[in-house]
Each structure stands twice: as structure tokens, then as C-alpha cells.
Image (spheres, rainbow, N blue to C red):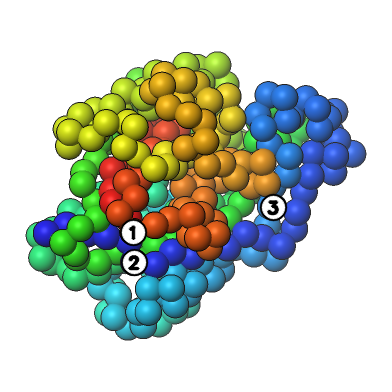
Amino acid sequence: MTTRIIGTGSYLPENIVSNNDLSKVMDTSDEWIVSRTGIRERRLATTETTASMAIKASEKALLAANKKADEIDLIIVGTITNDYVTPSTACEIQAGISADKAVCFDINAACSGFVFALQIAHAYLQTGMYQNALVLGVETLSKLMDWNDRSTCVLFGDGAGACVVEKSDVGIYGFDLGSDGKKGVALSCENRRNNNPYVEHSKDLGYVRMEGQEVYKFAVTTVPESILKVLGKHSVDPSEITYFVLHQANVRIIQSVAKRLQVSEDKFPMNLDHCGNISAGSIPILLDEMNQKGMLKKGDKIIFSGFGGGLTWGTCLLEW
């Protein structure tokens, strides 16, 4: 007995921001961004919130899975951009879709967040504690960006992806997850500082800071190793994988992973050209796009692999 994905959904903000649009408000260019990242545009929230995007993605996933919200046992959200410190985004989703029976919580694993959340849901379902779960990755990263830092802010976008999982005879084979907290400062964002009467404090807001080369080196070595580890554990050859659905951070990273695995880039679908880096949201959003296009066939073996802040990484092998 394992678990399988039975429905997907996603939502992107209405506001489309191209590289040329950004060049009007900062010193950058379409050529500079595309040549280094592969990103041509991204969606940036204006009226949308983390919870409102997640609710819309959840509704689509439930419809695709032919499930009613009150049938959902568990809601787990991977995010670093909650609207509130508390309540959690998962609890906001529960209220928004009336999933009154669900147990709800968020997890913070940055760009690996969706895979981490999926593993937690898988483990809960395996124990028999719950029969199904709604798992999401959602971010409003634009609110964490320093829009004067042209090297970082152009990389990111906003959006939500969701999937419904339930117990099944076929589906998820297994996972490989890991963390390297010693390198965590390579990609970080400071939270609000202590503001009690006994400390000197600054009201400056924290913004995302990234050491691009350090993150790149981490990704191009760790991701192939993690993928090969989970494939080896289940005696699956890379050639048997129909699609490698990677976190959409940078086209160069994805190309490097393909080369190291000696697998055609055709097996690495990408949407970063029109979505940018949506952290925990990138894998489930891409998965839903693939599903909507009819790319996923029963029996396809698929790899999910996320990597990013923490530093963290997470890989999942499943059969569609």
C-alpha cells in the first residue's frame, strides 16, 4: 500500500510582469535576465494573497480529484510567505474551502517545501491515521524581495500549486530528503526582530538574500546525487523516467542536472520562462500545467526534486 496523486490544481496571479517591464523600474534588461536564468516573465501578486491563491488552487485540485472539501482529512502547506505568523496558511485554506474535518499545518523548507509536505502526507497515510490529504506549495515571494536588488528580485514570482493524495496500491515509491543548515546563510530572509522594551532594535524589514554561486554549486551536485539515490533504492534506471519535474530555479541548473544524469533535456519540462522561481510552488504548479496539457499518462515514472533555502533538498519517485 502506498499513496498516489489523484488531482492537481494551480493558480497564478493576474499581473504578468515581463523582463522589459522590470527594465523600466530598475537597471536590467531582457537579454541579461534570459541569458543567465531562462526567465522571460513572472506573475506578481497585487490583490492576491498567499491564502487566496492557495484556496483557488485547492478548489481546482479537489474538482480534478472528484473530492468534496469535507472529505479531506489533512491539509499540509509548504510555504515561507504566510499571510500571518498565525493562523497557518493551511488553516486559512481550511476555512476558505470548508474542509472542516481536516487537520491543518504549514511547513517551512523553502523551495523543497512541496516535496517535504508530500512526504509527511505520505507517511501519515501509510500509518492509516488518515485516508487522504491536500498538499500545497504556495508563495507570495514578491513581498520578500528587495526591489533595489536587481540580481535577486528578477528571479522570483508568485503562485500556488496543489494536489490531492490518497491511499492506493500504486503511486509513490519513496523519497530522499536532506538538509545542510551550515550553508543556510547562502539563501536567507530575516524575520521581524525582537521588539521588546529591553533591546535595541531596528525596524528595517528583512529581504531575501542569496549567494547565487553557492546555491548553484549546491544544486548541481546535490540534486543529481539525491535523484540517483532514490532511483538506486528502488532499482529504477534514469532511462525509465518519463519526466524529471525539478524546482524551477534556473535553466542552467536544470541543464546541468540533465547532463550529469546523462538524460535528454526533453525529459525536464520547464515553466520558469513564464513563472520564474516560485519556491515551494514551482513543482506543483508545473505538475498541474503538465497535467492540463495531457502530458501525464498512467504508468509514467516521474521524479520530483526540490532544492533551496535551508539549505534543503527533497526528491520523490512515483508512478502516475
In three-dimensional space, the C-alpha distance between marks 2 and 1, rounded to whole angstroms, equals: 11 Å
Q: Residue 147, how many percent across, how many down? A: 73, 38
Q: Which of the two labelled residues, at mark 2 and mark 3, occupies the earlier sequence position?
A: 2
The residue carrying pointer 1 sits among few (fewer than 14), some (14 to 19) or many (20 or more) residues within 10 Å by Cα, namely: few
At 52% from the left and 50% from the top, the residue drawn is 286
Vertical position of residue 192 compared to residue 182: above or below = below
The residue carrying pointer 2 sits among few (fewer than 14), some (14 to 19) or many (20 or more) residues within 10 Å by Cα, namely: many
Inspect the image, locate mark 1, and give the three-letter code of the amino acid beneath it.
Lys
At 48% from the left and 55% from the top, the residue drawn is 295
Q: Secondary structure at mark 3?
A: loop
Looking at the image, how many numbered discs can be counted on the residues?
Answer: 3
Q: Which residue is mark 3?
A: 44
Inspect the image, locate mark 3, and give the three-letter code of the amino acid beneath it.
Leu
Camera-side residue of 8 and 23: 8
Q: Which mark is residue 298?
A: 1
At 75% from the left and 54% from the top, the residue drawn is 16
Q: Which mark is residue 158?
A: none
Quarter of the rendering occupied by the C terminus: bottom left
Quarter of the rendering occupied by the N terminus: bottom left
Camera-side residue of 47 and 167: 167
Q: Nearer the viewer, mark 2 or mark 1?
A: 1
Q: Secondary structure at mark 1?
A: loop
- Position of 2 with respect to 26 (left or right) is left
Q: Which residue is mark 2?
A: 6
Vertical position of residue 234 compared to residue 82: above or below = above
In three-dimensional space, the C-alpha distance between marks 2 and 3, rounded to whole angstroms, equals: 29 Å
Q: Which of the two labelled residues, at mark 1 and mark 3, occupies the earlier sequence position?
A: 3
Camera-side residue of 167 and 142: 167
- Position of 312 with respect to 200 (left or right) is left
Vertical position of residue 312 compared to residue 182: above or below = below
